[in-house]
């Protein structure tokens, strides 16, 4: 089988490609990636050239997309502008990549009758009340879309396009909405790698607002395995939520990072909160577990976080060249 993986040189996409090469020897991959700030050739550098081909290009380029889709058996669509803070400062790239780019891929997949899987986010559902209020609510595939940020709104728009192409044109497509990922190859502006690399580079970690916002963490390798199961065995037209019951407050995640890296509990700075900061995410992955038999393997968050810390410590040459620029950008906004 041959897969076209968009955004396959980014964090989650690259981990998926590594997983395919390691676990599925009869599957080859073409990666289509624009190599923006979060895409990196180095993420694919150790993979065999006979199994993985990188094409540098834009998913809004209809001619390029048409040619690549015509040569593949399935498309796994990871490519996205994905950072909330960036979407608040400049939404335009999010509209172009997340909406126009998805439309371009859907048109090509419809033309060639190619299987399509849309990688999406739990942020399309908005947020949930904190559990301290007595709420036990979780997102399900039946939850109402209620995006809070330009990023989430453009991903919600893309999901709706996928659903329309399934219903209107019979496209063989599925959607997955996943909770917050952590693991190797994550760009250093994101919450966990930012704290880790701040410590490794002699900076103090930063914590938004009061640190009470809750994220539902999943190791990226578990996300990759879930996507494969959905691609191979998922029901066409269905949406699957991917999560590992990993709810934790931001302040508790930072406290664990500080502990694992030998720092004092107060060795961080409070910074300005994100505008419209979602309170809590929580995924109910019952459908995925019951229908496809998927279960998370990295269920010890502390152990998974230690592995992630070790990876960043061992790969300083990967993140160090961009670190100062990322922190300078945060300082402009008081974060």
Image: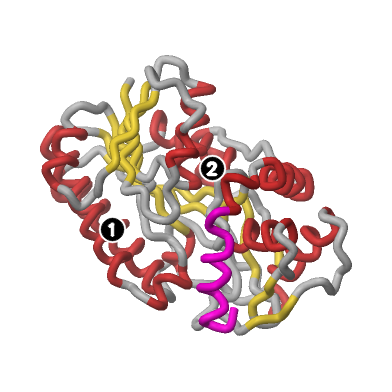
- Is 169 displayed left or right of 255 in the figure? left
Residue 183 circle label = none
The quarter of the picture where residue 51 lies is: top left
Please give the range of residues in magenta. Answer: 321-335
Look at the picture and state if 246 lies above or below 231.
below
Does the CB distance between marks 1 and 2 fall below 8 Å?
no
Look at the picture and state if 11 lies above or below 73.
below
- At 16% across and 40% down in the image, what residue appears? 64
**Residue bearing the label numbered 2:** 223
Report crowding for label 1: few under 14, some 14 to 19, many 20 or more residues within 10 A (C-alpha): many
Determine if the magenta segment contains residue 15: no
Determine if the magenta segment contains residue 323: yes
The quarter of the picture where residue 296 lies is: top right
- At 49% across and 58% down in the image, what residue appears? 140
Look at the picture and state if 262 lies above or below 22.
below
Screen quadrant of the C terminus: bottom right
Task: Please provide percent x and percent y for residue 298.
Answer: 69, 40
Residue 151 makes an appearance in the image: yes
Which of discs 1 and 2 lies nearer the camera? The answer is: 1
Task: Please provide percent x and percent y for residue 17.
Answer: 45, 33
- At 73% across and 56% down in the image, what residue appears? 200
**Residue bearing the label numbered 1:** 97
Q: For this rendering, which residue is in front, 235 or 17? A: 17
Farthest residue to the top: give it: 26
Q: Secondary structure at mark 2?
A: helix
The disc, 1 or 2, on the residue closer to the chain's N-terminal end is 1
């Amino acid at each position: 089988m041959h897969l076209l993986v968009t955004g396959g040189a980014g964090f989650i996409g690259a981990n998926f490609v590594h997983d395919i090469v390691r676990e599925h020897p009869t599957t080859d991959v073409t990666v289509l990636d624009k190599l923006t700030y979060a895409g990196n050739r180095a993420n694919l550098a150790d993979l065999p050239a006979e199994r993985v081909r990188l094409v540098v290009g834009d998913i809004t380029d209809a001619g390029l997309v048409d040619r690549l889709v015509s040569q593949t058996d399935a498309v796994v669509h990871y490519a996205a502008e994905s950072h909330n803070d960036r979407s608040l400062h400049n939404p335009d790239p999010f509209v172009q990549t997340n909406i126009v780019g998805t439309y371009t891929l859907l048109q090509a997949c419809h033309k060639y009758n190619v299987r399509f899987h849309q990688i999406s986010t739990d942020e399309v559902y908005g947020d949930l009340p904190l559990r301290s209020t007595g709420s036990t609510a979780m997102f399900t595939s039946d939850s109402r879309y209620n995006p809070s940020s330009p990023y989430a709104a453009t991903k919600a728009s893309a999901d709706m396009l996928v659903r329309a192409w399934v219903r209107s044109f019979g496209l063989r497509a599925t959607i997955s909405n996943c909770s917050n990922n952590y693991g190797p190859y994550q760009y250093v502006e994101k919450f966990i790698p930012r704290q880790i690399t701040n410590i490794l580079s002699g900076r103090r970690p930063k914590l938004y607002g009061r640190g009470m916002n809750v994220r539902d963490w999943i190791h990226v390798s578990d996300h990759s395995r879930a996507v494969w199961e959905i691609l191979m065995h998922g029901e066409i037209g269905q949406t699957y939520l991917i999560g590992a019951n990993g709810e934790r407050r931001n302040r508790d995640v930072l406290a664990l990072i500080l502990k694992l890296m030998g720092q004092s509990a107060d060795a961080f700075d409070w910074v300005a909160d994100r505008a419209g900061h979602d309170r809590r995410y929580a995924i109910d992955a019952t459908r995925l577990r019951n229908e496809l038999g998927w279960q998370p393997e990295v269920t010890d968050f502390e152990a998974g976080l230690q592995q992630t810390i070790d990876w960043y410590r061992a790969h300083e040459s990967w993140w160090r060249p961009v670190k100062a620029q990322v922190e300078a950008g945060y300082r402009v906004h008081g974060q």
